[in-house]
Amino acid sequence: MATARPIRSMDPYAEQFWTYTLKKELRLQKCSDCGKFRWPPGPTCDKCLSEEAEWAPVSGRGKVLSWTTFRRKYFDEYPAPHTTIVLELDEGPLFVSYPVDVAVEDLRESMVLSLRWTDGQDKFGEYNLPVFGPPSA
Amino acid sequence: MAVRFDQDRLGRLRDTVAVVGVGETDYGADYRGAGGKAMGKGEARVDHYTLASRALKRALDDAGLTKDDIDGLCTGPTLSSERACELWGMNPGWSGSGDAAQCIIEATMAINAGLCTTVALVYGNAQRSMNTAYGGARVTGGGITSYFYYAPWGLTSQGALYALFFQRHKLLYGTTEEQLGAIAVAFRKHACMNPNAVMQKPLTIEDYMNAPYVAEPLRLFDYCLINDGGVAIIVRRADMAKDLKHKPVMVSAIGWSEENVDATQLRPRLKDFYHTAHHGVAAQVYPMAGLTPKDVDVFATYDSFSVHLLASLEGFGFCKEGEGGPFVQDGRIEIGGELPCNTSGGMLSESYMQSWNHQPELVRQLRGGLGQRQVKGAEVAQYVHDVAGKCKSIIYTRQ
Ligand SMILES: [Zn+2]
C-alpha cells in the first residue's frame, strides 16, 4: 500500500501528469509552438495561446526560492512539523514540493536540489510524488 | 509594458463621488456571542445577511438617508445581491459585487456613467459561527487555486503562502522576525484604542516572539482573526453629498492593476512581492489625486497577514524595496508616528472583514474626533489591497 496523501486536484491534464509519475518521469507541458514550459497543467500556452503541447521531460534540477514549516497540522496525512519548499526549475516554472534528506536548518536560498520520488495514493489511485533532495554525488 | 490607463479620463473621476455613511456591527460582541468559540456547520447563530443588514441600517442612519434613497447596491462575496435586495426591499438600478476596494471603484464608475446616484456597499460574514476554514482539507472550492493544488505535498492555507513570501523576504533582504512583529504590535496598540475592536489586550514584542509558529516563519499574531461581522458604506454623487449628517469624504483616486501570469506557481508573490502591480496602481492614484506618498496621513492595507504591510509600503514607495523591515519599527507606523497604518487594529486585531472594516476607519479618521485614536490633522487617507495579485487602491480626502 502506497502512502495516503491529501487528495489531488484532478482534471484530464492533471491526470496525464500523474500517469507519467507511475513511470517516475517528471514531465511538464511544453508549448509546441513557442517552447514555453507550463505548470500546473492546462489547455493553453499563456505566452502564445497555442493549444498544441507535448509532455516533455524536465531535468529535475531546481534552485530553492523559499520554504515554510507547518507547525500546525492541516492534514492528517502530514503531521506537524512538516516542511514544503518552492524551487525554480531549470526549465523556468516554479515547483512546490517538499525536501528530503536535507535538514530545514541547512536549506539555503538558490541551493540546488534534484528530483527524488516517493509513493502516494488517494481516491484517484496510486502515483509517485516528486520530491527534492541534495543531488546525489 | 506600456502604460495602459488613461490619466485624463481617470483624472476626471477625482472627487466625483463621496462617502456619506459608514456602519458596522459590534465586532467584539459578535465575537463573544458564541463564547468566542466557533460552532459547527449549520449551527450558526447568525448568518451573513443578518450581519450585513445590521451594518446597512447603521450606515444609512450615519448618512441620514433611508433605503429608498439607495439606487445602487454592491455586495461582498458572501451575499447574493438578489437575496439581499429581496430582504431589504430594494430594486437598485445597478448592482455589483466584489471586495471592498473593487466595490468602491465600481460604484464610482457606475455613478459616473449615470446608472445610479447613491450606492450601498454591504458586507456580512458569519465565518466564525460557520466554522469557515482557510487551509487544509476543509478548504472549499478546490480545483486549481494556488493553495489547494499543492495538497499532495502538504501545502495549503493562505498563511503558508505568506510564510513562503516572508521567508523569501528574509532571504533576500535580511528582514527579521522582530521587524515583522512590530506590525502586529502596532496594530494591537491601535485596537486597544478602538472600543469596537475584537482584541483589547495589549501585545508586546516579547508576547509576539513567544507565540507559537503556525507556518514558520509566521507566528500566531501574524494571522488575521476569524470573526463574525458586517460592514456597510454609502457612497453618493458628490454634488448630492452636501447637507447630510456628516461632511462628505471624497474618493479622490482609484487605481487597479493585476499580476496574474504564473500566479499558481506563486511567481508574482515570490519573485516580485507583487511590486509590479503596486507600481501600476501607484502610477494611477497619486497623479489622479495630485498627491504623493509623502502627503498620505493615514494608511491602511489589506492585512490578512502582517506581511502585506511590508509589501505595500515598499511597492507604493513609502520606503525602498527590501527596507520594509526597518521602516515598520520604532513607532513609525503607530498613531503619533510618521505613517500611522491600520489605525483601527486592522484585520489582525480589529476584525477580519476582508478589508471592508478598513474603509469606515479611514473615513472616520478624515471626519475627525476619534479621541486618542485620531491621527492629528488627517486630510489624506490611502487604502491598498494586494490580494492574490489583484492590486487596488483608494485615496480618500477631507475637503
Ligand atoms: Zn506557446
Image: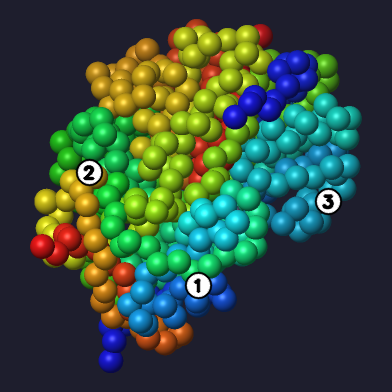
Q: Secondary structure at mark 3?
A: loop
Report the chain holding disc 2: A
The image quadrant where one finds the C terminus of chain B is top right
Q: Which SS class for mark 1?
A: helix
Using the numbered discs, state the Cα–Cα distance from disc 1 to disc 2 in whole angstroms. Answer: 29 Å
Residue visible at 80% across and 23% down in the picture: B237
Q: Are marks 1 and 3 on the same chain?
A: no
One can see residue B366 in this view: no
Rendering coords of residue A76 (x, y %) = 30, 75
Say the numbered circle drawn on residue B89. Answer: 3
Specify the quadrant of the image occupied by residue B397. top right
Left or right of B239? Residue B309 is left
Chain ID, mark 3: B
Q: Is residue B259 above or below residue B149?
A: above
Q: Residues within 10 Å of mark 2 (few under 14, many from 20)?
A: some
Residue B113 locus on image (x, y percent): 86, 30
Colour mapping: rainbow
